Structure formats: C-alpha cells, structure tokens
Image (spheres, coloured by chain):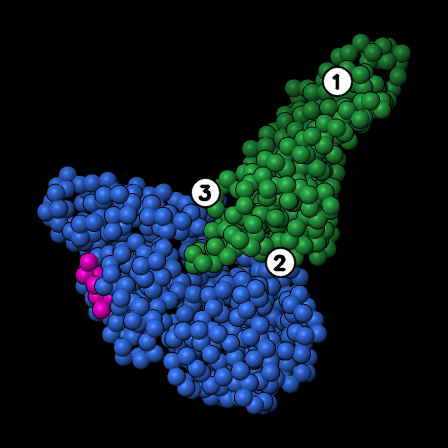
Amino acid sequence: MQRRHFLGGCAALSLGAFMPHVGIAASRDTLRIAWTQSYENMDPYYGASREGLIMARHVYDTLLYIDPLNGEISPLLARSWRWLDDVTLEFSLRDDVTFHNGYPFSADDVVETFNRVVQPDSGVKVRSIVEWMKGAEKLDDYTVRVYLARPNPTALNSLASQMGIHSARYFAEVGRDGVIRNPVGTGPYMVKSQETDQGAVLERFDGYFEGSVKGKPKIKTLEVKVIPDVNTQIANLMTGQIDWIWRVPSDVIDKVAGLPSVAVESAETMRYVAIAFDAAGRSGASPLQDARVRKAFAYAVNRQSLRDNIIKGKSRVLHSPCFPAQFGCTSDVTQYDYNPERARQLLAEAGYPDGLDLTMVAYTGKSETEAVAADLAKVGIRLNTRFLRSPIVRTMMENGEAQIVMLSWGSYSVSDVSAAISMYFDGGGYDMTRDTEITAWVKAGDTSLDPEVRKRSYDLALKRIAEQAYWLPLTTTVTNYAYVESLRFRAPYDEVPTFFDCSWD
Amino acid sequence: MLEFLLRRVVLALAVAFAVSIIAFSLLRLSGDLAQELAGANATALDVQLLREAYGLDRPLWAQYLQWAGQVLRGDLGRSVFFDEPVADLLAARLPVTMRLGAFALVLALVVAIPLGILAAMRPGTWVDRIALGTALVGQAMPTFWFALLLIVVFGVKLRWLPVSGNDSWRHFILPAVTLAYFAMPALMRLTRAGMLEVMSADYIRTARAKGLRPSSIILKHALRNAIIPVVSVAAVQLGFMLGGSIVVESIFALHGVGYLGWISVQRADFPVVQAIVLVLSLVFVMLTLLADLLNAKLDPRMRGSRR
C-alpha cells in the first residue's frame, strides 16, 4: 500500500507535467462528484457508510439541523422544540412540507419512522443512532413527543444529524426494500436514478419548502460516481470529467494544488489522533503504570513538528482528546510541550536511565507513528509499532492486550465531548485507564442535561486525564478536498460535505 | 472419451468442494468477523448483536453445513453490506468482468500468437529480440503502473479515451489493454517455444521436402501442434483475468466482480466473499476442464494418457 501510494504520487506528478491545460468549463447545471468508497444505500437508518450518510443529508430532512460549520442546532422539519423533562422532548412541526412524491408531511411520518426504527429487530445498521430513544407519540397532526430511554444530552445532535424522516404512507406501500431502492424524502434533492455501488443522479426538488435552513439548492443536478482509485479521480478532475473529489491523500494534495483551475482545501476535521496508554496494567505489569514514564513519553514527542511536517493543513496540536469546538472540550489542562531533556530526567527518576522498550498497536498513520518513534528514540524509548486492522485493535483493547494504542477517532461527527471520550473512560471494554474518578465524572456528564454540570464534570475528567498523562492527544486531522476553481464549496469539520449550499462563480 | 470426460468432471467438482471449504474456513480464521463487520465505531453490544444475527457464534461445521445446504439449493445468501441477495450483486457484475476478460484475452492472443510465430521463424534476430523484450517489459511492469501510464497518455494528454466507468465499449479499451499486456508474455513465449520445437520436427522437414508453401507449413502443420499448450494456458489466463482483474477494475472504476470482491474483503462481507471465491473457482475449474477437452480434441494422444 505504501509503495502504491508513493508510485501513485509519482503518477500524479507526471500527470501534472503532461498537463496542457485543464479543459472544459464545468457545465453550470450539474456538479459531478466522485469518491473512492462505495456505499450500500442512501438511507439514514439502513446504511452505515459515510458516503451514504452524505447522500441521506441531501435526500432526507431531519427534525432539527446542525450547522456543519459551527455545530449550532436549529429547527428544520420542526418549527420549535422544548424539553418537558429529562426524558421527554416536544416538537411542533411545519405544516408546509411535502415529500418528493407529493405526499404531505405530518406528525404521522415522524411517529411511524421513530417507532419503527427503535424496535430491536428494525434492521437499523448502527444501533447507537437510535438506541437512546424509547419512542414517539402524536399529540396532533403537527405536534409530537419523543421519549428517551434515558437522559441523553446528545439527543438533539442525533435528531439533527442522523434521524431522517421517511414517509409513513410510502413506507407502508413499498416496504423497507422499496424505500432503499427508491428513496423518497423531503430533502432539497430527489433521487433520479441510482445504481448500487456505482453512483447516483440527484435532482433539485422544486417543491422544497420555503424557509428551510438548508436552503434551496442552486445547482440543479448532482452526479455521484464511485471511482475507487485516487489517481483515476485526479485524471478525471484534470480532464474535466469530475468537478469535486475528497479525501485526497496528503502526499499527493500538494501536486493536485499545482494543477491549473483546481482549488484544494485541507480542512480540519473533528477527528483526533491520540495515543492511549495501558495505565491500568491490564496487559501485564508495565512501566506505563508509572505516571513518570507516561509523562516522559509525552514530553519526548514533538507534536508541533508532527503537525507542521506530516499532518499539515489546518490541523492543530491537541492537549485533550477531543475537538476544541465540541461541547465540553477544554484545552485548559496540563500541557506537555516538547522537552526531551525533561523526558530523560523523568525516565531516570522512574528507574530507566538506559531507556526502555515499548510496544504500540496502530491501525492508521504510518508516517505519524514513524515520527513519534523517531522522537522517542532520542530519549531512549524504543517503540515497536505493529500495524493491525482496526477491529483487531479494538478487540485487543477490550481484552486488555494492548500496551499502547494509537487511535484515530471521529466522534461519530457529534459535536459533544461525550462522543469523544465517554466510551474510552466509562469503565467499559475500551477503557484502558480504569480510573474510577474519571469514570464517575464521565457518567455524571453523560446523564445530566444541565450544561453547567456537564461542563464541570468533563472539565474535571479532562484535567485528570492530562495531569496523569493517561493519554497523549496528538493533533486534529485534515480532510483534503480538490475541486474545480469556479465552485463555491464550504468544507465542514464533521466530514459530511453538503452540496445544497454549493454554487458556481 | 466419455470416461475421460467423467473423470475430469468428478475431479473438477472435488476441487470446487475443497476450495469452498478452504475459503469458508480461512475467512473465519482471519479474525473476528462480527468485530470486522461492526467496524471501527462499534460498541461491544453492536458486535454481539451482529454475531448472533449472522450465526457467527455457532460452531464452524454447523455454519458450513448451513451455507453449503443453501448453496446447493441455489441460494448464495445476502450481502451484509449491501443488504441485497449475493446472486443479484454477482449477476449485475459478472457481465462487466466477463466482457473485460474476453476482450483482453482476444487482444492478448491476437498479439501473442503472430508475434510468437514471427519470433520463432527468425530466432535470434531483431524481430525475436523485440518480441522477447516486449514480453519481458509486460511481465516486469506492475499492472497498476502500466494502467496509470495509459491514463496519462491516452486519457489526459491525448484525450482519446475515457479513463473510468463502464458506460460504453470505449471504456473497456484501456483496462483490456492493461490486462492483455499482463497476459500476453506467457502466451507469446509458449507460442514461440512450441513453434521452435515443432519446426525442427521430422514431419515439418518432410512437409518442406514435399515442396509445400511455407505459409501452409507454418499455419496448417506446425501451428496446430505448437498451439496445444497455448490453449491450456489461455484458458488458465482467462481464469486469472476474471479473478485477478481486481487492480485493473479498481483503477478504471469498472464495477465488476474483482472490484466487488476487493471491497467485500475490506468490509468482511463474508457472504459475498464466499460466493465470489466459489463462483470464480467453479469458472476456473470449468475453464481448465474446457482446456483439457480442447486439448484432447486437438491431440488424440492425450485422451488416454492422463490417469
């Protein structure tokens, strides 16, 4: 893979050298999008891939809307909402919305969708999207109540990002398979055609309701194609066959940036990279149970250089394992600036004047781990890294078999610190730290609806994580976009790009 | 002849059965399928639910028997990822891969056989060197690199051909050329070697002595014997092309079986992987069988000699 990338990079370079000019101006009415991953379908519930989720955002609407640029939540299919108590939400719905097939939207659609997907045997691919909800109830045609299974501060987030509304009548007519094959939503785009795994054509829905925060699309047609090879995508971008690509590897993005009439953007994402230590000693007696060794590790890694030379773009060095804009995230914690001298001293104090050997498992970030290992070697820590597939790393974490883990975590695109840290510090399977105090704080934050209580709890947890150097957060990551220069596109940090707000110059 | 045929068919079935067991076991020994299916964002509960839903908590032999029973009844199962019958997925993609494979094989033969004959007619001359050199480059150059070169030259610079998709026959040209260049050297070398051997045989000298025209000697007498090994290898190469077009299919965004197999392995979509391995091994076995039969037809000596 590594070699292929390298050669791929050369190919991109030579593509550039060959290039006479980037041709054909993009046709105004159509935006041609390509991505490498195929997706199973574009349903908000019965699919699990990110690309499917992107499509779902265009075809379906949710009750609420989360602004991909600042995380703010506003009403979409709802006119307003309020909490009645910890586990009850009430929504007043819009009465001027229709589905793509002309069926009017009402409380029945919301109630039927929610009560169907919360059933344990509903076939929802990612249960965690819906498992927090107990069900919904219709009060009148445009008022519904949503009942939570337990207090959940990220409920609004789920309702705003994932939980699209199917038409109850259409679902009754065609069933689950029919809805997957011919999706009908209330969103700004309707599906004109789709072929599993190859692509789809979406067309602007002219009956889209006035006043939607998503806005009426300016571009009439979206053509989506699955092109698995990045170099082929770039060739298509150069010859004017494709207007927009993303997730371009960092080692080729600079070359793509040199192409005429192509704009690139390396946008920061919510995803963080961090190193987690087996501070609890579950993998056997380990030097990492000693906080001094963990701190030495932290002081030894030059994260600024890692950011500047490898991750690049708009990424930032992190001090807490969360995205700074997430609710409850704080950087006001113990910080370990690059200090190899201090690292050596701490190691000597801990009884390792001659250094020590450590083993890390990772599923991503080859160049990152190499940079980290090189830094560590300078203070005498010999880091041996094993690359495994992410599910295997997960299993090792669960079984307490990993001494050090390098993680890349996207928080399910949820702008709340609970999505960033809770599953790693709640005392459950993925908790390598097993600090009961942190677990209690995290639990308190996860179950309270009072923002102040939540902030305080997470603040305590994050401060202790840093103070004890249980984890070493490295940086945020970037997603690279490349598109024709005349396109107005805004890169989101939740890795769910939207096109209904795109336009041509 | 009938006995020969029966023996070959039984052997072919045995091979397919063995392959199905190996494919089935390897998939399950490669790691925790439920964990793989659930993906990086899954909770322990998600994994447990998946494990139960797909019966992955049951003993291996029970899982195999159930699967084999379904297959015998013509049911290849449902894709976990696409949530569609595997048979439908394969039916939609097999034509793409078949077209690519057939196109490439024809292309490879059309180049390899004349080039092999030419090289054998003038061994050691510049014609021979060019033929052998071309074959060497074809064998040495990684497929994806050659594919990228074709894209740069014909897609980006000259803009003669589309570089991705499978909308028209023009979309198949670059991928087929890539695949053909990969298969061509073996066929060319075999033709050349076969021709060299045959041309020094006694009956060719006799034919020459009779004063037959050289073209008649080469095409009627020599080639017919020299081509026998080429037939078997061509059938096997077609099998390789069908199974091994993964790289080519993904570079040129041809949505065929190879590409489906590749993404299914990545996603641990085991019903699809099992089905693809089974179907491709059956195709492979059938092609080998076909090659044997063709050989038997071309060379009567082989009918009895293989035990």
Residue A386 lies, in percent from the top left, at 36, 42
Q: Give the prevailing secondary structure in the magenta stretch.
A: helix
Chain (green)? B
Q: Earlier in the sequence, mark 1 or mark 2?
A: 2
Q: In this view, does A479 lie to the left or right of B264?
A: left
Which residue position holds label 1?
Answer: B306
Mark 3–mark 2 Cα distance, whole angstroms, equals 34 Å
Residue A465 colored in magenta in the image = yes
- For disc 3, the marked residue is A3
Residue A475 is tagged as: none
Circle number at residue B83? 2
- Amino acid of disc 2: Asp
Q: Is residue A33 above or below residue B1?
A: below
Residue B201, quarter of picture: top right
Q: Is mark 1 on a helix, strand or loop?
A: loop
Q: Nearer the viewer, residue B158 or B3?
A: B3
Residue range in magenta is A460-468
- Which label sits in the foreground, 3 or 2? 2
Q: Say few, some or many: other residues with alpha carbon within 10 Å of mark 1 (under 14 / 14 to 19 / 20 or more).
A: few
- Tell me: A485 left or right of A269: right
